[in-house]
Image (tube, rainbow, N blue to C red):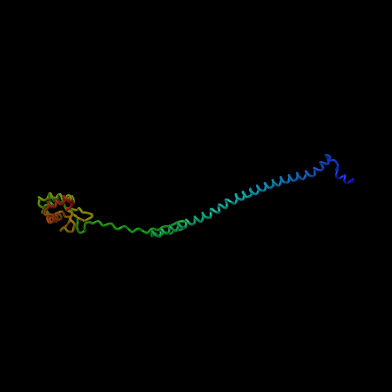
Amino acid sequence: MTSGDDTRNPAPLTRRSARALVAPASAPASKVATSARWSRRRGVVGVFAGVAALAFAAASVGPAAFALTDAAPAQSETETVYSSTLEDAQSLVVASGAVVSLDRDSYSAFEKPKPPPPPEPKVAAASPATPFYSGGGAPSEWMAAAGLAESDWGYVDYIVSKESGWNPNATNRSSGACGLVQALPCSKVPGNGYDPVDNLRWANGYAVGRYGSWAGAYNFWINNNWW
């Protein structure tokens, strides 16, 4: 009975006994809270550290990777464009017929020599067998000596003045016509084509035979500037 009574009626709780009961229970709770806060902080720090490490790695490796990725196609593209340009240039040279040697550093070209220009036509000159006139005299004397009628002297003077200016040695450089009336060719004049009397004597037969008279020869010259 005595022990039963002791169990049902415990001793009264004092302040000291209450602290003793509360202290052991409160200490682990404080330690648990502190440990939980530290764990959270360490987790957050770890996450930030991981993110920072990844960012640094990306900043270091990224540019190099992009540079390598861009460099390869650029180099390949440069080689392709250069090769195609070189092939096109060689094709154009072969089509043009010129002899050209091309390489990667320089080129040299050789043009075909131009054909020499054709020779210029030789200027007709008086034949050495036909000497120039060196005697004297006047137009009236020459016409009289050639047997021309005085009524024709005006026509003769007009034609001879236009053809040679009364120069017995006048020569056309392109045709070779010679003398007072510019006989062509000079060799057709009997005697000497540069002799004024021989030249006028031949001209008299030419004017009458071709135009009927010196008047007819004069009219033809007026309309055509030659006879």
User: Residue 18, percent across and down?
Assistant: 82, 41
Q: Residue at x 72, y 46 (%)?
A: 36
Q: Give the total of numbered labels.
A: 0
User: Residue 65, percent across and down?
Assistant: 57, 53
User: Residue 133, percent across and down?
Assistant: 18, 54
From the viewer's perspective, tell me whether residue 222 is left or right of residue 34: left
User: Residue 185, percent across and down?
Assistant: 19, 57
Q: Residue at x 74, y 46 (%)?
A: 32
From the viewer's perspective, tell me whether residue 157 is left or right of residue 59: left
From the viewer's perspective, tell me whether residue 168 is left or right of residue 40: left
Instruction: Residue at the far top: name it.
Output: 15
Which is more toward the observer, 72 or 156?
72
Instruction: Residue at the far right: name it.
Output: 2
Judge whether residue 120 can be spotted in this image: yes
Which is more toward the observer, 208 or 40?
40
Judge whether residue 197 can be spotted in this image: no
